């Protein structure tokens, strides 16, 4: 009620003083009223409205209100009024912070930017984190527009007030201002700000220490004194040993941020001990952060990655926590790219074998979590291009063959997605001898998603095997996929026939695909006859007119006579697709064969068949 009263008081004051504004109850056509300012008067009045949505709309239009009031009245009346509504709805406050961050032109330019600090400071004190984040973001924007003198006078004082506030939310907000403030003030003033920052790094509240740790990289970027950097490193080390894991978990990000500042061995040698401590941390979340950022750590500490980061990664690949092992397994290719040697692969193999050994051989050491094995399956084939064909065949194929027979469909599915890349690396001989038996087995997998994934790899495998060997080894699977019990597999088979036609040519389709489609025309299950229609539509996108006239058009005409309405519907759709996708059907075929077929379907007794036939007629340009 107090907030509503404050809104009402200040809004009335603004309304009375707004040039041309009138009392809202007065008739719009009253003599002397400046009707152009009625929208502004309405916006000002809505600032005091009890409906949060109306207040939100008004806050979004603050620039319009400020323009109407002028810069002086905006500074002296509008901004103080906005400071009074800091206990409003969170969404309103977030929008208010965003508007104030863009409000420097309202108050007369950068010279008066400090006048916007008041309401933003109030927003920095609220409990809701998203509001505080928007407020500190706006204050950083204001700081960048201020002169050094203004920053010393206003921003330093603001930081001191917030950092000394009894509420931890205010102290947390102050942490986000240090980097911009330090960049603006002269070196003589930096010491005072840094003392305040270091005090917050040792605050009693873990949330404040966490917030201070979160910005240590940004602070380090603007610190100029060598002694201050040394003290910052000491603080970083202390935060990395904090008794709360919510604070320690930020140590890895800080290692990356600080490591980027200076690539010298001396500087980075001061940071690496923290990495080693994180790898042995009692909290799995901290260890998780290390392996999750293994690639960035290798990039930052490139000169010493093989002796510092990589050994820590290998140890965590066998961590006791499933979550740590899973993310470590997913990063195996990222880490290997920084050490693509036989020695590293030979060190890595025992750890990967421990994750993939069949249960009957080593039940006491095998990875029990399918999520870890799935993570490894998704990344292990990324090692093939890194180590090359020889090392892949020598070491990695065995890992692949274990994973491809894993009892978890999630593992098998992850592995199949990279089959094409493996084919490009190992060559035809290895693909034929080692992998094809497994691929054929997976093509008949009990899980339909696995069958689908294998099907989608066929064009890339056909590219490396060549027409003859692909046909001998894998073409029989397509008959199974066309009659798969799951529609998604049958639909994907029709799409992949088109891709295979692009790779192997239409002559291959004429010899090996068309007979399979013709065999489906007489199948007793109408769903498989629909598969033939889908394939005809898909192939029409790459087929020339002679192929269409000779093979696909007769097939569709036969399907249009099917006793099942659903098949006739798909025949009408296929005619439309054939015409749309290529326009390659000869005029004779269109007028002499397809249009008469559509005319029969338009007269069909089934309403769905009639509808799709009429639509096809209109799209091919024919008239009933």
Image: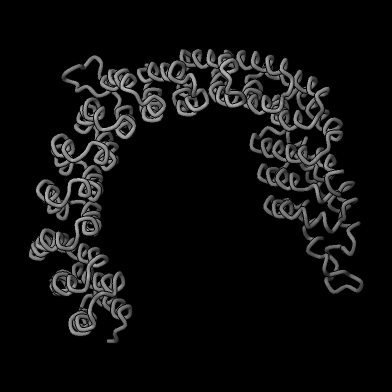
Q: Is residue 9 visible?
A: no
Viewer-nearest residue: 279 or 489 = 279
Foreground residue, 514 or 226? 226
Quadrant of residue 315 within the rendered picture = top left
Q: Position of residue 60 (x, y in %)?
A: 71, 53
Q: Residue at x 25, y 54 (%)?
A: 492
Q: Position of residue 562 (x, y in %)?
A: 13, 71
The answer to whether residue 378 is seen in the rendering is yes
Percent x, y of residue 343: 32, 19
Q: How many marks?
A: 0
Looking at the rendered image, the quarter that the N terminus falls into is top right
Along the line of sight, the residue nearer the viewer: 31 or 235: 235
At x 48% / y 19%, what residue is drawn? 304
In the image, taking residue 514 as reference, residue 146 lies left or right, namely right
The quarter of the displayed image where residue 400 is located: top left
Residue 172, picture quadrant: top right
Q: In the drawing, does residue 548 fall left or right of residue 209?
A: left
Direction from residue 349 to residue 87 in the image, left or right: right
Q: Residue at 31% across / 72% down in the picture?
A: 580
Left or right of 64? Residue 517 is left
Instruction: State the scheme by which the image is colored.
Output: one colour
The C terminus: image quadrant: bottom left
228 relative to 616, above or below? above
Q: Is residue 424 above or below residue 489?
A: above
Which residue is drawn at the image coordinates 73% and 51% (left, top)? 59
Given residues 279 and 311, the one toward you in this image is: 311
- Residue 463 percent across, percent down from the top left: 22, 49
| Above-or-below relation of 273 to 332 | above
């Amino acid at each position: 009620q107090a907030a509503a009263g404050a809104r009402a008081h200040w809004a009335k004051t603004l309304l009375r003083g707004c040039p041309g504004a009138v009392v809202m109850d007065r008739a719009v056509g009253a003599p002397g009223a400046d009707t152009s300012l009625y929208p502004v008067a309405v916006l000002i009045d809505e600032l005091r409205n009890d409906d949060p949505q109306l207040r939100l709309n008004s806050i979004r239009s603050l620039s319009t209100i400020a323009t109407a009031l002028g810069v002086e009245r905006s500074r002296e009346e509008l901004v103080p009024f906005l400071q009074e509504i800091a206990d409003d709805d969170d969404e309103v406050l977030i929008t208010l912070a965003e508007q104030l961050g863009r409000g420097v032109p309202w108050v007369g330019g950068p010279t008066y930017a400090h006048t916007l600090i008041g309401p933003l400071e109030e927003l920095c004190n609220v409990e809701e984190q998203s509001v505080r984040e928007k407020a500190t973001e706006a204050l950083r924007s204001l700081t960048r527009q201020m002169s050094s003198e203004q920053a010393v006078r206003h921003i330093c004082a603001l930081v001191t007030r917030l950092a000394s506030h009894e509420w931890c939310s205010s102290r947390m907000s102050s942490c986000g201002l240090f980097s911009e403030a330090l960049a603006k003030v002269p070196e003589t003033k930096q010491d005072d700000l840094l003392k305040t920052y270091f005090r917050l790094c040792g605050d009693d509240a873990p949330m404040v220490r966490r917030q201070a740790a979160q910005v240590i990289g940004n602070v380090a970027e603007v610190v100029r004194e060598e002694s201050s950097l040394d003290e910052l490193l000491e603080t970083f080390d202390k935060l990395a040993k904090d008794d709360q894991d919510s604070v320690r978990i930020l140590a890895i990000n800080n290692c990356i941020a600080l490591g980027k500042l200076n690539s010298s061995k001396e500087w980075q040698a001061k940071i690496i001990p923290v990495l080693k401590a994180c790898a042995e941390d009692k909290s799995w979340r901290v260890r998780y952060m290390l392996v999750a950022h293994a690639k960035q750590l290798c990039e930052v500490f490139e000169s010493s990655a093989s002796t510092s980061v990589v050994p820590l990664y290998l140890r965590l690949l066998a961590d006791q926590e499933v979550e740590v092992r899973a993310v470590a397994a997913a990063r195996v290719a990222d880490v290997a790219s920084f050490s693509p040697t036989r020695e590293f692969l030979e060190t890595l193999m025992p750890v990967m074998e421990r994750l993939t050994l069949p249960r009957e051989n080593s039940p006491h050491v095998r990875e029990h979590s399918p999520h870890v094995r799935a993570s490894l399956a998704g990344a292990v084939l990324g090692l093939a291009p890194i180590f090359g064909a020889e090392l892949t065949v020598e070491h990695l194929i065995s890992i692949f063959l274990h994973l491809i027979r894993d009892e978890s469909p999630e593992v098998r599915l992850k592995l199949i997605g990279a089959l094409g890349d493996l084919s490009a690396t190992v060559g035809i001989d290895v693909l034929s001898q080692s992998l094809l038996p497994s691929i054929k087995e997976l093509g008949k997998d009990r899980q339909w998603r696995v069958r689908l994934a294998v099907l989608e790899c066929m064009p890339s495998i056909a590219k490396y095997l060549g027409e003859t060997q692909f046909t001998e080894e894998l073409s029989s699977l397509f008959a199974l996929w066309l009659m798969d019990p799951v529609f998604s597999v049958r639909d994907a088979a029709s799409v992949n026939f088109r891709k295979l036609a692009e790779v192997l040519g239409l002559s291959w389709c004429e010899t090996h695909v068309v007979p399979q489609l013709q065999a489906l025309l007489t199948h007793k299950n109408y769903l498989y006859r629909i598969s033939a229609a889908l394939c005809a539509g898909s192939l029409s996108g790459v087929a020339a007119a002679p192929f269409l006239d000779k093979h696909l058009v007769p097939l569709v005409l036969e399907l249009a006579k099917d006793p099942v309405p659903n098949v006739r519907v798909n025949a009408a759709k296929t005619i439309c697709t054939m015409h749309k996708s290529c326009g390659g059907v000869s005029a004779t075929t269109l007028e002499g064969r397809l249009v008469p077929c559509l005319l029969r379907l338009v007269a069909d007794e089934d309403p769905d068949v009639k509808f799709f036939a009429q639509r096809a007629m209109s799209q091919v340009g024919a008239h009933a």
